[in-house]
Image: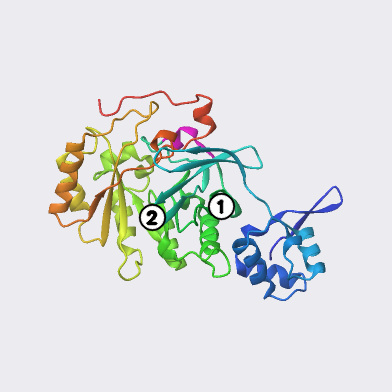
Amino acid sequence: MVQAARVERGMVRPSLEVKGLTRAELEHALQEMGELRYRAAQIFQWIYKRQVGSFEDMSNLPKALRHSLAERFTLKLLSVLQEDRSRDGARKFLFGLEDGKQIESVLIPDEDRMTACLSTQAGCALACAFCLTGVMGFQRHLEAWEIIGQIPALQERLQSEGRITHLVLMGMGEPLHNYEATVKALRVMTEKEGLAFSPRRITLSTVGLPKALEKLGEEGIGVNLAISLHAPTDDLRDQLVPINRRYPLKELLEACRAYPLPPRRRLTFEYVLLDGVNDRIEDAKELAVLLQGLRCKINLIPLNEAPEIPFKRPSRERLLAFQQVLHDQGYTATLRESRGWDISAACGMLNTEAVRKGLFRNKRAFFS
């Protein structure tokens, strides 16, 4: 049963954000109110197609229903606190949440596409050694509506500059750590009457939590999957991606092999290259063996350096040599240049108040 309101000091207050509901949940809530289920499709169209800011604006709904909706639900908008524009066209947005927490999202223009990079958590608990989001630590999971709400807020900022065509859950946080809210958000993103994105245009990036990967495969949503790998051995990955100590590579790769890929689709493995750490020819050869037999491609991402991160970006020669080994082994391996570096909007650079207040972890020596 959908809980529509809470009692506070003897009065009924709206407590349920309508953008946090799937269409099926909204239909159920409407039935409990004595309304017809088809009204859910109308409400979704007002919210996601016309992007109205209040129930009163939903002019094809009966006035009594609009009043009832306003009594039982909220229709919130995320608050943009700051916008930064990169020289390469990327735009980073700082959103303020109701409890004072903050998250960042990024818009990335590229020829005929406009990609929105969305956050699923405030901060991150996984503390990958080369990622600034981990500096913040874990603050909290985002609610489904806060994940979804980044999209209309970003689209509103675009105005006449185009429409968002692709979504990547690669912002702050680990999407599968916030599993229920992430899956609910994905369902609304792909609902025909919702945001109506094709699953082919949505990519979820994860360090790879095996049980969550198995569960996601059973959901049947069909979004693209990108696995943040970053090392070809457990010893190295334990240091770079601490969750590997709990879910080692063997368990992760078994989950990847079992994942139900749609026809003509491939897994993507993301590999951030760190100078002298995981970018040797031997690492490339071990990576080629590790991924053998998987229908996949590999995104090679040169480190986006930051003063708080104890690593350096490899030289162009080392990057190309690493890539060539993978090409020679028959893999599609692309060198991906991140966008928005000058505004700290590139991969691994999203961070809010932790950086602004100077609350960094001390640099530490790796592999000494």
83 displayed left or right of 259: right
From the viewer's perspective, is residue 245 above or below residue 35? above
User: Over which residues does the magenta segment extend?
Assistant: 132-139
Q: Is residue 127 above or below residue 143?
A: above
In-image side of 75 versus 158 (left or right)? right
Q: Measured from the top left, where is residue 289 in percent x and y? A: 18, 52
Q: Quadrant of residue 220?
A: bottom left
Question: From the image, which quarter does the N terminus lie in?
Answer: bottom right
Using the rendered view, name the quadrant where residue 33 is placed: bottom right
At 21% across and 52% down in the image, what residue appears? 290
Looking at the rendered structure, the kind of residue marked 1 is Gln
Q: Residue furthest front?
A: 160
Q: Position of residue 21 (x, y in %)?
A: 62, 62
Quadrant for the C terminus, please: top left
Q: Secondary structure at mark 2?
A: helix
Q: Which residue is mark 2?
A: 210
Q: Is residue 299 magenta?
A: no
Q: Which numbered disc, 1 or 2, marks the residue closer to the eye?
A: 1
Q: Position of residue 128 (x, y in %)?
A: 38, 38
- Report, in whole angstroms, how far the alpha carbon at label 1 lies from the one at label 2: 40 Å
Q: Residue at coordinates 52% horizontally, 66% vertically from top-left? A: 196
Residue 36 got which mark? none
Check disc 2 and give the amino acid type. Answer: Pro
Q: Residue furthest right?
A: 10
Position of 282 with respect to 26 (left or right) is: left
Q: Earlier in the sequence, mark 1 or mark 2?
A: 1
- Tell me the number on the disc at residue 159: 1
From the top left corner, tell me how far across and down residue 258 is, in percent. Answer: 33, 64
Which is more toward the observer, 15 or 167? 167
Identify which residue, 228 or 353, lies in the foreground. Answer: 353
